[in-house]
Image: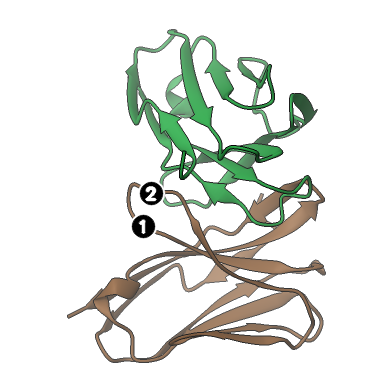
Amino acid sequence: GAGVSQSPRYKVAKRGQDVALRCDPISGHVSLFWYQQALGQGPEFLTYFQNEAQLDKSGLPSDRFFAERPEGSVSTLKIQRTQQEDSAVYLCASSLSPEGEKLFFGSGTQLSVL
Amino acid sequence: TQLLEQSPQFLSIQEGENLTVYCNSSSVFSSLQWYRQEPGEGPVLLVTVVTGGEVKKLKRLTFQFGDARKDSSLHITAAQPGDTGLYLCAGPNTINDMRFGAGTRLTVKP
């Protein structure tokens, strides 16, 4: 596609539910990043993939958060047993280079946990 | 924890005015980036500055990287309503981890 595509655009979950957020990066982009953006804040790094390898997951806030990119293209961020503090916009970004010098962001998934 | 501090947090001005927003850190960065984010969208890269003292211009936007590579500024001349948005600065924490400031939310009133 022409840009980074994320789905769903909006997700409302009841506390305790599991959610899965999808990211389709720009075709051919090696690097893929997930960020969490709370209201009124800048994006906070969650995790990074180079092709199918998850090279950095230091930003994942708890073991309820899990990300995968099994074929080096589409990525899924899964949050188990959602909590209210998980409510945020989840942004995916991809980059052509392994160093992630120029990030292209998707429009994000706005997650609301009730 | 934000490595990059942005100021002001909010800025509301009239069309035609000039403004400057700032991005400061106690850390030295190999490069800094500026992004603009509109409501409901992801950030869009405006510029990357890599050399201390560097000045880059993008139409009415002027970006400067501090000599010590710890700070940067964005100056907008004759602001227009289309400049409204959240301006974010970002710098690499590690090679794969771009850290963002909290942003300056700019509103330009017609």
Q: Position of residue B68 (x, y in %)?
A: 82, 82
The numbered mark at residue B38 is 1
Is residue A110 left or right of B26 when viewed as pictured? left
* In the depicted structure, whether residue A39 falls above or below residue B23: above
The percent coordinates of residue B65 (x first, y second) are 70, 81
What residue is pinned by disc 2? B41
Q: Is residue B46 left or right of residue B68?
A: left
Three-letter residue code for mark 2: Glu
Rendered hue of chain A is green
Say yes or no: labels 1 and 2 on the same chain: yes
How is the rendered protein coloured?
Answer: by chain
Q: What SS does tag 2 mark?
A: loop
Chain B drawing hue: brown
Of residue B14 and residue A31, the one placed in the foreground of this image is: A31
Quadrant of residue B32 in the image?
Answer: bottom right
- Residue A92 lies in quadrant: top right
- Tell me what residue is drawn at x 74 percent, y 24 percent: A52
Q: Quadrant of the C terminus of chain A?
A: top left
The subunit carrying tag 2 is B
* Amino acid type of the residue that numbered disc 1 sits on in the rendered structure: Glu
- Which one is nearer the viewer's eye here, A97 or B35? A97
Tell me the residue at 56%/21% (across/down). A76
Residue at image position (63%, 27%) is A73
**Image spot of residue A53 (x, y percent):** 78, 25
- How packed is label 1: few (under 14 Cα within 10 Å), some, or many (20 or more)? some
Residue appearing at x 40%, y 91% in the figure: B77
